[in-house]
Image (cartoon, helix red, strand yellow):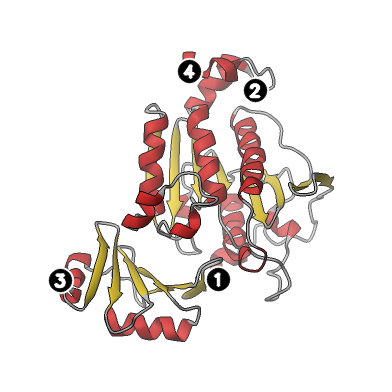
């Protein structure tokens, strides 16, 4: 326990017994970008025994001002965030078992992806995924911590099934387009991410160590230094709390505009995954193959300047250089196939 000496002196955590409990725990971080990357690093350094890292995206240069796990070499290589993040985290604490998964959490796989978890931490960037995650955690009886960061403001609270308000108590339905600020419209300040991840990681460690969940919704603005804690009671009419997991039953989105990116993520029709080796051979000479590996292939076509296609082994693709789903579908069909 020598490496955790300072942590063990924190009476609120619970001493060696709590540290041993952390070492026996498994946490899942969904989304390994700004908030999720900082969360994962905090848990690895704290000695949480097993960590499943789920992310659907690749490292981009525009990530680096706020995403602490990555560097310019990761962006230049176009590495999958789960892969690059796990490589860095492995150098921080060899005692932690890491399981990187290059995939997108959705209604079809959420229950599987959080199976066996003692805690789930939110590193996502959209309400739709959080509602799916909320349903999955309630269905599994797994606590999770919501952490949203937009602009300079942090929002967060823990969800403990059967004990606290859930995310659907807080947000019964998806807000209409344009009604809520997003990272696309308001941006994200790097220090706000660190504050949000700090609160969420501390709450997660508390829950793993057996402590009680914090009460209410925390709202912090790092620019104005204003902080509030708002009451968040359970909604007696909440469908999710009543066991109606409607977002798990909903079909997954086939097209998603990525927040803060000039890009669209597509899910290929059908369930078959692409043969990346064969695809690379077919695209050879038709443009630049900037990255290839077992998780993904990144291709810049010569005939469609300004666009990049990143094709993943799980059947997804990210088409950069457009926010028009129809244009993204057209480019995918032209270069990958229908």
Instruction: Please name the residue that numbered disc 1 is placed on.
Output: 250
- Whether residues under marks 2 and 3 lie with C-beta atoms below 8 angstroms apart, the answer is no
Mark 2: few, some, or many residues within 10 Å (few <14, many ≥20)? many
User: Residue 104, located in which quarter of the rendered image?
Assistant: bottom left
Q: Residue at x 41, y 47 (%)?
A: 71
Residue 13: image tag: 2
The mark lying in front, picked from 2 and 3, is 3
Using residue 107 as the reference point, say whether residue 268 is left or right of it: left
Disc 1 or 2, which lies upstream in sequence? Answer: 2
Instruction: Please name the residue that numbered disc 4 is placed on.
Output: 3
Disc 3 or 4, which lies upstream in sequence? Answer: 4
Q: Secondary structure at mark 2?
A: loop
Disc 2 or 4, which lies upstream in sequence? Answer: 4
The mark lying in front, picked from 1 and 4, is 4
Instruction: Please name the residue that numbered disc 3 is placed on.
Output: 281
Q: Residue at x 53, y 38 (%)?
A: 118
């Amino acid at each position: 326990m020598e490496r955790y000496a300072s942590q063990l002196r924190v009476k609120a955590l619970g001493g060696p017994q709590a540290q041993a409990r952390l070492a026996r725990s498994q946490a899942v971080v969904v989304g390994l970008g700004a908030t999720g990357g900082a969360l994962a690093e905090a848990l690895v350094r704290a000695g949480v025994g097993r960590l499943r890292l789920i992310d659907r995206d690749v490292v981009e240069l525009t990530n680096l001002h706020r995403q602490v796990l990555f560097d310019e070499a990761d962006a230049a290589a176009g590495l999958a965030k789960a892969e690059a993040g796990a490589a860095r985290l492995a150098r921080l604490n060899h005692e932690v078992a890491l399981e990187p998964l290059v995939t997108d959490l959705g209604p079809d796989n959420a229950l599987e992806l959080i199976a066996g978890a003692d805690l789930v931490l939110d590193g996502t960037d959209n309400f739709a995924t959080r509602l799916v995650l909320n349903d999955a955690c309630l269905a599994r009886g797994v606590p999770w911590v919501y952490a949203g960061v937009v602009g300079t403001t942090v929002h967060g609270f823990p969800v403990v099934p059967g004990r606290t308000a859930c995310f659907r108590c807080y947000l019964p339905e998806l807000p209409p387009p344009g009604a809520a600020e997003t990272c696309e419209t308001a941006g994200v300040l790097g220090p706000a991410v660190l504050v949000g991840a700090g609160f969420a990681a501390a709450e997660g460690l508390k829950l793993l160590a057996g402590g009680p969940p914090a009460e209410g919704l925390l709202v912090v603005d790092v620019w104005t230094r204003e902080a509030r804690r708002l009451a968040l009671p359970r909604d007696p009419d909440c469908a999710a709390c009543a066991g109606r997991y409607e977002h798990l039953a909903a079909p997954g989105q086939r097209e998603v505009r990525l927040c803060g990116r000039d890009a669209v993520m597509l899910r290929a029709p059908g369930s078959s995954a692409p043969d990346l080796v064969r695809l690379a051979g077919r695209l050879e000479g038709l443009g630049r193959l900037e990255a290839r590996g077992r998780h993904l292939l990144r291709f810049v076509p010569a005939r469609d300047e300004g666009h990049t296609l990143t094709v993943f082994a799980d059947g997804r693709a990210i088409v950069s250089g457009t926010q028009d789903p129809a244009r993204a579908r057209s480019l995918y069909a032209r270069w990958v196939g229908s």
